[in-house]
Image (cartoon, rainbow, N blue to C red):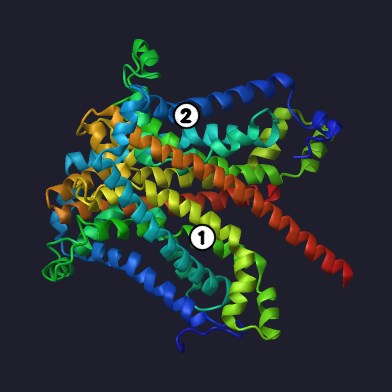
């Protein structure tokens, strides 16, 4: 290990641990990525642009990111509310609800997909009440948002919850003594302190939602230009042995995801700095 | 969280109607988005009676899907344990150049759509790629076969154990391991007698998450499987096929196994979290006592 200087540690096993990690990382993660880059590199620029600007592809990418954004906003609101209630208001069955929040992590996405589709179909438990209101959820973009809300919920709750738990009560007591009302305290003291975590949670939910497939595919209806998500475009291109086309769509999806993550990291840095006193 | 103190509760909490209204709203959301979907899986599975439910699970294709799912998890989980422990040992116990890059790369599979993950393996091992053609000529199929399913599953579960162990081992520090070595223990002895007991709950936590994802993965596996009945279908893929054939009882019967797995996962996860908090609290008391004695 000349290249890598492991500085003064008496512990053994660095070579073995590092070697095993790097070998598997290379084989399982980096090699497939190399295949992606290689395939993308084999395309001419005109082919690439032609593929990713096709009407169906553009519509699907817009839908995937739009529905993910809508779902992460809904999750930010209700995830925050749920974390707030779980931390601050004792109620019977709180432990159970707390454990249940992780259900979307534990329940396979295909199961969530068929369950939600059956519930929101026009004759389903929930769909039958929405149908008379003229609200169609299953087999429309709205259904995609419902599935993505399900998938993303734990991300927001689990990032906001610890911050609310660690909040010092003295801060609130001091604000109360100084004559602030509850709403004022929430707006000026509590919310700014939680905001960075809330942005992180919503971002994680968003990132997960953009690429989500299993839970969405059943409820979406997959109508071209209307409810066809980007991952499905990739799959149908692969089914037609258009590997270059599938790669082009994947590259655009990855690029937009990284751009969003970068922008939101900057936003979060700004939020943490602006409310630096709150932390 | 010191809600036991009635005086502080009065000064820093909302009025009773507001509290009740917010709790009710949050619980309504939980019921609508979590409880009803979960209940509906079992409801639909048993809607045509116990007989049809049982029949749906013992037919050969369902059994073969269950076997493949178990096999996949049986390979993915131990792999993840070995990789996770090795990565955590290197990252949490040593300083080296490129450490933050390595940490970022380990997390990479989380930021890739499962479908793209599956696709990358098709690009690497597909029959019309150089590697895939060579393997095929030697009688070894990866894509549309079991190896591809295992690889895709390993990819999507790749970060779970490492991600759990790295912060845990960093927080624990190397003091106890160094002490063991100074006292004459060998490297393996130190690992087995000191490190492993310290990380066992974190490791188990990672295993639970890995197992749940490995058994339930859909997108990545769907791309590489080829959906060959009785051969390359896992339980989630079996659910999809039955559902698309309007065999709803069959689909939900298989789905109910996965839902049951999810419930077991949640219970196990809650238990391990509870143990970890206890271990953490005990460690803190020990440190405080040691400091007080010194």
- Compared across the picture, whether A93 is left or right of B53 comes to right
Q: Secondary structure at mark 2?
A: helix
User: Mark 1 sits on what residue?
Assistant: B163
Could you tell me which residue is drawn at 70 percent across and 30 percent down? A89
Look at the image and tell me whether residue A69 can be seen.
no
Res. A130 image quadrant:
top left
Provide the chain ID for the residue under circle 2.
B
| Residue at the farthest bottom position | A2
Could you tell me which residue is drawn at 32 percent across and 20 percent down? A136
Could you tell me which residue is drawn at 54 percent across and 37 percent down? A101
| Residue at the farthest top position | A132
User: Mark 2 sits on what residue?
Assistant: B33
Residue A206 is situated, as x and y percent measured from the top left of the image, at 43, 43
Q: Is residue B92 above or below residue A244?
A: below
Task: Please tell me which of labels 1 and 2 falls first in the chain.
Answer: 2
Q: Nearer the viewer, residue A116 or A149?
A: A116
């Amino acid at each position: 290990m000349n290249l890598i200087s492991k500085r003064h540690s008496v512990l053994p096993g660095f070579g073995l641990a590092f070697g095993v990690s790097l070998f598997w990382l290379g084989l399982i993660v980096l090699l497939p990525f190399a295949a992606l880059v290689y395939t993308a590199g084999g395309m001419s620029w005109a082919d690439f642009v032609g593929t990713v600007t096709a009407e169906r592809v553009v519509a699907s990418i817009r839908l995937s990111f739009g529905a993910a954004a809508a779902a992460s906003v809904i999750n930010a609101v209700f995830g925050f509310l749920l974390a707030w209630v779980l931390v601050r208001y004792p109620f019977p069955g709180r432990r159970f609800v707390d454990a249940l929040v992780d259900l979307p992590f534990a329940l396979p996405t295909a199961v969530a997909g068929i369950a939600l589709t059956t519930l929101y179909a026009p004759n389903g438990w929930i769909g039958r009440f929405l149908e008379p209101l003229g609200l169609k959820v299953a087999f429309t973009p709205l259904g995609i948002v419902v599935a993505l809300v399900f998938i993303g919920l734990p991300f927001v709750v689990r990032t906001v919850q610890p911050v609310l738990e660690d909040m010092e009560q003295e801060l609130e007591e001091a604000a109360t003594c100084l004559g602030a009302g509850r709403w004022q305290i929430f707006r000026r003291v509590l919310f700014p302190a939680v905001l960075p975590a809330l942005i992180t949670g919503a971002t994680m939910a968003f990132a997960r939602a953009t690429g989500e497939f299993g839970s969405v595919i059943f409820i979406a209806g997959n109508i071209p230009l209307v409810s066809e998500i980007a991952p499905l475009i990739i799959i149908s291109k692969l089914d037609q042995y258009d590997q270059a086309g599938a790669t082009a769509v994947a590259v655009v999806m990855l690029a937009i995801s990284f751009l969003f993550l970068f922008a939101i990291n900057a936003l979060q840095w700004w939020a943490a700095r602006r409310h630096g006193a709150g932390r | 969280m010191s809600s036991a103190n009635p005086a502080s509760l009065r000064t820093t909490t909302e009025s009773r109607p507001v509290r009740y209204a917010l709790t009710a709203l949050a619980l309504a959301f939980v019921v609508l988005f979590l409880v009803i979907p979960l209940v509906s899986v079992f409801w639909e599975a048993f809607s045509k009676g116990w007989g049809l439910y049982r029949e749906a699970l013992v037919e050969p294709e369902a059994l073969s899907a269950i076997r493949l799912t178990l096999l996949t998890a049986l390979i993915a989980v131990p792999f993840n344990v070995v990789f996770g422990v090795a990565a955590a040992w290197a990252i949490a116990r040593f300083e080296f150049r490129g450490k933050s890059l390595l940490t970022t790369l380990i997390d990479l599979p989380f930021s890739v759509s499962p479908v793209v993950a599956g696709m990358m393996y098709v690009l690497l091992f597909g029959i019309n790629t150089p590697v895939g053609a060579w393997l095929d000529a030697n009688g070894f199929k990866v894509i549309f076969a079991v190896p591809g399913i295992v690889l895709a599953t390993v990819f999507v579960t790749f970060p779970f154990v490492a991600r759990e162990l790295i912060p845990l081992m960093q927080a624990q520090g190397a003091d106890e391991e160094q002490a063991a070595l100074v006292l004459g223990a060998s490297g393996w002895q130190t690992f087995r007698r000191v490190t492993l007991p310290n990380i066992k709950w974190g490791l188990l936590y990672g295993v639970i998450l890995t197992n749940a994802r490995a058994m339930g993965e859909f997108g990545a596996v769907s791309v590489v499987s080829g959906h060959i009945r009785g051969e390359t279908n896992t339980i989630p893929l079996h659910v999809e096929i039955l559902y698309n054939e309007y065999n709803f009882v069959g689909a939900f019967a298989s789905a109910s196994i996965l839902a049951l797995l999810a419930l077991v996962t949640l219970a196990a996860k809650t238990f391990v979290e509870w143990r970890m908090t206890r271990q953490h609290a005990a460690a803190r008391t020990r440190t405080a006592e040691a400091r007080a004695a010194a």
